[in-house]
Each structure stands twice: as structure tokens, then as C-alpha cells.
Amino acid sequence: MKFIKGLFTFVGAIVVIGFIFAFVKFDLGTRIGQVSKLDSQALPEYMKMFDKVLTTGDPAKGMIRKVKMVIPEDMTKAEAFENALEIMDETADEYGMALVDSKTMPRNGKLFKDGGLLTHIRSYCSPYIADMFLAHSAEFIGFMPCRIGFIEEPNGDIYIYTMSMELMINGGYVLSPELLELANEVRSGMYAMMEDAAAGE
């Protein structure tokens, strides 16, 4: 009995020493204070991303949203794609997002129009919102312009991709009410553009 009691005392002492070492070594006191300043959604969003990375081993899957594009029976794939682009641009206009770049890229040396798999990237931006965020932090340039991509899989399915914007909005300290409203406006616009274009209506 004395041996077991002594063993537990020893283990407890090791745990306490380990905690003190970690607290000093990694400056946990400062870290805890810093974490408390983050947006309340920051840690849950980081955990969602990390969970996808652990599950898939692919960091890109933790940062991207995608939706499958519907190809109506009365349309060819090319017609459905052109219809999706038109709808996407219309939705973008409703949210004050302007198309600033558009490129179709070859896959295996062939463009979509020549029978290759579709790879198309579109970039959108709101100059006013971009200016507001760059005044807040120049590093936001890394998120600009907002991009949406169309990727055709070998089986013919087409998916629309864009970056998940939750970490940009909630991943750090709480944004000011004005910036938060603008960021949510961009997120709503980008996600609506994806969904509307994918549905074809």
C-alpha cells in the first residue's frame, strides 16, 4: 500500500514538474492570454481545418469549399459551363463584386474547347472593400482577388471551388463591426456565386 501511494506521489510530482516546464518553456501564460483575445470562432474553425487535414492528409482540403455543378439534360457540358459563368457574374454584380480576371487553362496540353478537361479560374473583387481591408492589414493582399475555379474530373463531373473564408474572418482578433460586416458580405457573395452557378439558376 505504501509502495502504491509512493508511486502515485512520484507520478504526480513528475506531472507537476512537466507542467511547470511546459508552462515556462512554451510561455503558456502569454499564450493563454493571447488566445483569449481571439474571435470566439477562431479555435473551432482551426480545429475544423485541422480535422480535415488529419483525415485526408491534404492541407488544401482543409481550406477549400466545393460544390458539384449541375449539367441539365437539355444542355451540353459546354453550354452548362457558359450558363454557370453568366449566372455567376450576375450574382457577383448583385453583391458589388467585379470580375477582374478570367482564364481557361489546358489539362494535359488540351483546352476544354479542344476536348480537354475543364480548368477555369475567375477572379472577383470589390475595390472599396479591398481598400478597407488593406488599410487594416496589408497582408490581406494574399487573399485578393477572390478566386473561384471550375475543375472537371476524369469521369466528366465538374466541381466549383473557392477558398473557405471563415479563417480570414474569424481566425484572429475580432474584426471591427464595419470590417466584419464587409467581410461577411464578401463571404455571402462568393458562396452565393458558387451555389447559384452550380445549380444553373
Image (spheres, rainbow, N blue to C red):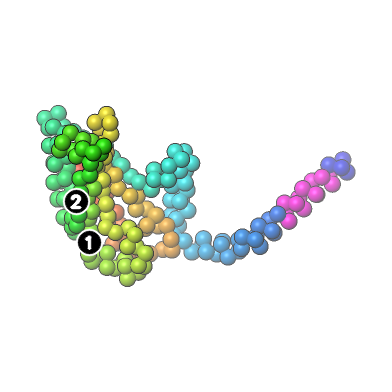
Q: Which of marks 1 and 2 is in front?
A: 2
**In-front residue for pair 143/178:** 143
133 inside magenta stretch: no
Pick the quarter of the image with the C terminus.
Answer: top left
| Residue located farthest toward the bottom when viewing the structure as drawn | 135
**In-front residue for pair 147/35:** 147
Q: Give the range drawn in magenta.
A: 5-17
Give residue 70's position: percent from left, percent from top: 21, 35
Mark 1–mark 2 Cα distance, whole angstroms, equals 16 Å
Tell me which residue sits at (13%, 32%) in the image: 76
**How many marks overall?**
2
| Residue located farthest toward the right when viewing the structure as drawn | 2
Does residue 111 appear anywhere in the picture?
yes
Q: Is residue 102 depicted above or below 160 in this figure?
A: below
| Res. 81 image quadrant | top left
Give residue 125's position: percent from left, percent from top: 23, 59
Q: What residue type is labelled 2?
A: Ser
- Residue that label 2 marks: 102
Q: Is mark 1 on a helix, strand or loop?
A: loop
Q: Which amino acid does label 1 sit on?
A: Ser
Q: Is 35 on the left or on the right of 110, as rendered?
A: right
Mark 2 is surrounded, within 10 Å at the Cα level, by few (under 14), some (14 to 19) or many (20 or more) other residues, namely some
Q: Which of marks 1 and 2 is nearer the N terminus?
A: 2
Q: Which mark is residue 126?
A: 1
Q: Is residue 114 depicted above or below 31 in this figure?
A: above
Does residue 48 appear anywhere in the picture?
no
* Magenta stretch secondary structure, dominant: helix
Tell me which residue sits at (26%, 37%) in the image: 108
